[in-house]
Image (cartoon, rainbow, N blue to C red):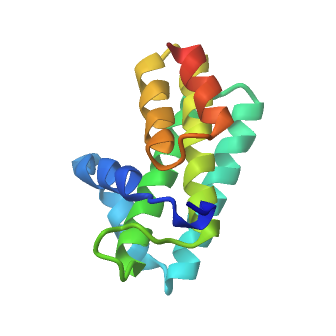
Amino acid sequence: MGEKSFSLGPIMLHHLDHLGEDDFDVEEMFTKTSSPEGAISYVTALKEDANALFKLRDFNTAFVLYNKSIKCLCVVMCAISDDTQLCEVSLELKDLAFSLHLNIAASAIKLNKFNDAITSCSLILESNKRNVKALFRRGVAL
């Protein structure tokens, strides 16, 4: 199985199932951006902001922004996906989703939110059982 065929279905379904009233801005994000590319740029900008906060050791705010980023990404992928099984996405989007979940796990570990770290890593491992960082971070959280 080639790396491009990994499914992001479990990640997308997890986050879409957990959209709540507090996530109204996530759903509005897609309507505010003029295109899927604009929405992906927005997600990338959120991730970069969270990365900067993580480096400043503001793990809680980084954790919140990483979670918002992955939810936004899942809404975007759902909106642009032609595949009803949610199996095929571009390599760029897969890498972004994995990176966000690894960052969620890293910040969750710093906050002693080990169940959140385990969940993020397990979602990656459902799609790619050989992701070394996900295996390592899940092990740390366990």
Q: Residue at x 29, y 47 (%)?
A: 22
Rendering coords of residue 142 (x, y %)? 50, 13
Q: Residue at x 53, y 40 (%)?
A: 129
- The residue at the far bottom in this view is 34
Can you tell which quarter of the image residue 109 is in? top right
Whether residue 111 is visible, yes or no, is no
**Residue occupying image coordinates x 37% and y 58%:** 9
In the rendered view, does 14 fall on the left or right side of 133? left
Is residue 102 placed above or below 58 in the rendered structure? Answer: below
**Which one is in front, 134 or 71?**
134
Residue 99 percent coordinates (x, y): 63, 48
- Along the viewing direction, whichever of 7 and 81 lies nearer the viewer: 7
96 and 83: which one is in front?
A: 83
Q: How many marks?
A: 0
Q: Is residue 74 left or right of residue 110?
A: left
Give the x, y percent position of residue 55.
77, 33
In the rendered image of this protein, does residue 115 appear above or below residue 93? above
* Residue 2 placement (x, y as % from top left): 60, 63
Q: Is residue 98 visible?
A: yes
Question: Would you identify the image quadrant in which residue 1 lies?
Answer: bottom right
Measuring 54% from the left and 47% from the top, which residue is drawn there? 128
